[in-house]
Amino acid sequence: MSARWTVLALSLAAACQSGEVRDSLAPTRESAYEVVIAPILRERCVGCHGSERAKGGLRLHTPEAIRAGGSMGAVVVPGNVGASELVRRLHLALDDDEHMPPDDKPQLDAAQIATLERWIAAGAPYEGPVDGLVAPQKAPAPTKMAAADPAALSALRNELVHVQAVSQGSHALWIDFAAIAPRTDDALVERLLTPLKSQTSELALARSKVGGATLAFCGRLPALRKLDLRDTKVGDAELAGLGAQPALEELVLARTAITDASVETLLALPALRSVHLWGCQLSPDALARLRAKPTLRVDFGDTPDTVIAEVEDKPKFTSELPSPDLPPAGDPSAPVNAKCPVTGSPINPKYTRTFEGKVIAFCCPNCPGEFDTDPAKYAAKLP
């Protein structure tokens, strides 16, 4: 062997001993848990559920700790995303006391949650790879949402539609048509919401008269995360107008005309994580197909957590004591009415006006302004 090849051989042997060649040439069969899952848990969960702290008796810093669960039992059910408490809590509303992580802590993003769900669906293995599971790439910074047009917000409030930011400092909007549901139709929704297409995040249209045109309109709302259509006449044909709505995570269809024909529509919604279908006409086979999707929670009113355990009897009032709905007698600062003169709903004492020396209360922040436009119109409804 020439001196040159001797040097090369010695260099190669040294590299093998140091691990340089082994690491670059050996086939990669890394643990998906170690490479992908553990970093997510360390970044977002271990601060409260780790070796030094175990809220709820739960630690998530090792496979053994994850398997052990917490004071409420198992948090990961291998192969069953829907039954895994960890996933359930990640999908709860941010202001829910059981949401994980707490709302004052950094939250998991959609890619991280989807990664955990895929790992659990694959059996939650702690060794070896999981097909298709790779460390999620850092998502590009989302386009900053512009503030809503003040004129468009005023138009909503003038129609008695409730609107507010979904959270402090956010431009995303929660919009609720409950106060005017009986006269809310496709034309009204499109007219009021077209200027707010980019900001509409949570939309409540329960008990309204909307149909296919509104569903197609909602399919084009880029930030729509939650849609409530309960007690409407929406059926399979109308629901199909949503298409593959890209952002919708929660859909409420309780007591609508939805049937088995909507299964494909629901399965085609890429971001859908929760659908409420109680009171709808779906067969066991259709429910089974929906529930086979591991990332989708289906509320049909047939699971133990949706059963009403007890209903209190309606209270009966006698003449001995005044109704609790009425203000204390003799208090000049108390409202004189128990029902809102604008909507007829129970009052909220936070929203008041003084009219002809009397304090009048309303049900929401929109009603005082409506009352001011024509007090005489509503005065007859006051005590």
Image (cartoon, helix red, strand yellow):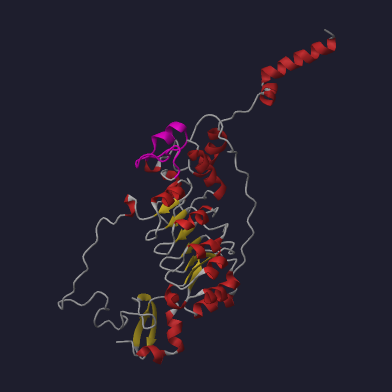
Residue drawn at point x = 35 percent, y = 84 percent = 359
Would you identify the image quadrant in which residue 364 lies? bottom left
Question: Can residue 330 be spotted in the picture?
Answer: yes
Residue 84 shown in magenta: no
Q: Is residue 223 left or right of residue 364?
A: right
Residue at the extreme top of the image, as rendered? 1
In front: 174, or 297?
Answer: 297
Residue drawn at point x = 46 percent, y = 32 percent = 63
State the quadrant of the C terminus.
bottom left
Residue 60 shown in magenta: yes
Q: Is residue 129 placed above or below 202 in the rendered structure?
A: above
Residue 39 place in picture, x, y as percent: 55, 38
Residue drawn at point x = 57 percent, y = 61 percent = 223
Residue 229 place in picture, x, y as percent: 45, 65
Would you identify the image quadrant in which residue 195 lies? bottom right
Residue interval drawn in magenta? 57-81
Give the tally of numbered discs.
0
Residue 227 place in picture, x, y as percent: 49, 63
In front: 337, or 315?
Answer: 315
Would you identify the image quadrant in which residue 335 lies? bottom left
Residue 111 place in picture, x, y as percent: 57, 47
State the quadrant of the N terminus.
top right
Q: Is residue 297 placed above or below 149 in the rendered structure?
A: above
In front: 105, or 380?
Answer: 380
Q: Is residue 297 left or right of residue 302?
A: right
Q: Is residue 310 placed above or below 324 in the rendered structure?
A: above
Question: Can residue 100 be spotted in the picture?
Answer: no
Q: Main secondary structure of the magenta part?
A: loop
Residue drawn at point x = 43 percent, y = 72 percent = 178
Q: Is residue 116 placed above or below 360 in the rendered structure?
A: above
